[in-house]
Image: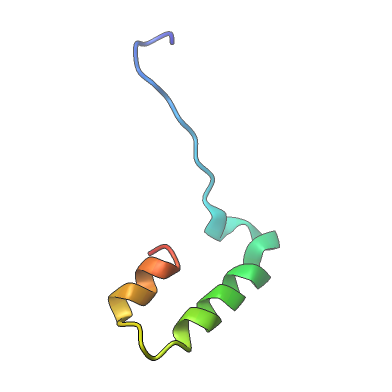
């Protein structure tokens, strides 16, 4: 630690084009669940 702070990196997985198919499938499955509220659906897909 040069500056006395912890530094961390985290990828933006929404920008990873290789994960688009899996991401779209997850959103479709969660979106089809009528028993979940909209806030619950957003949380389930990471928003």
Q: Position of residue 31 (x, y in %)?
A: 46, 84
Q: Quadrant of residue 25?
A: bottom right
The vertical placement of 11 against 2, above or below, is below
| 18 to the left or right of 41 | right
Query: What percent of the width, then of the height, locates residue 44?
Result: 42, 69
Q: Position of residue 35 (x, y in %)?
A: 36, 88
Total labels: the figure holds 0
Q: Is residue 15 above or below residue 32?
A: above
Assign the C terminus to one quadrant of the image: bottom left
Residue 40 horizontal side relative to residue 19, left or right: left
- At horizontal 36% and vertical 67% (from top left) the residue drawn is 43
Give the left or right position of residue 15, taking residue 40 as reference: right
- Image position of 11 with respect to 47: above or below: above
| Colour mode of the rendering | rainbow
Q: Does 37 sit above or below residue 43?
A: below
x 30%, y 82%: residue:
37
* Quadrant showing the N terminus: top left
Q: Residue furthest front?
A: 35
**Residue 36 quadrant:** bottom left
Q: Where in the figure is residue 27, as x and y percent of width and height? A: 51, 77
Q: Residue furthest right?
A: 18
């Amino acid at each position: 630690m040069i500056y006395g702070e912890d530094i961390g990196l985290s990828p933006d997985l929404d920008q990873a084009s290789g994960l688009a198919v899996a991401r779209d499938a997850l959103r479709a499955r969660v979106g089809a669940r009528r028993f979940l509220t909209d806030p619950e659906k957003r949380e389930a897909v990471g928003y």
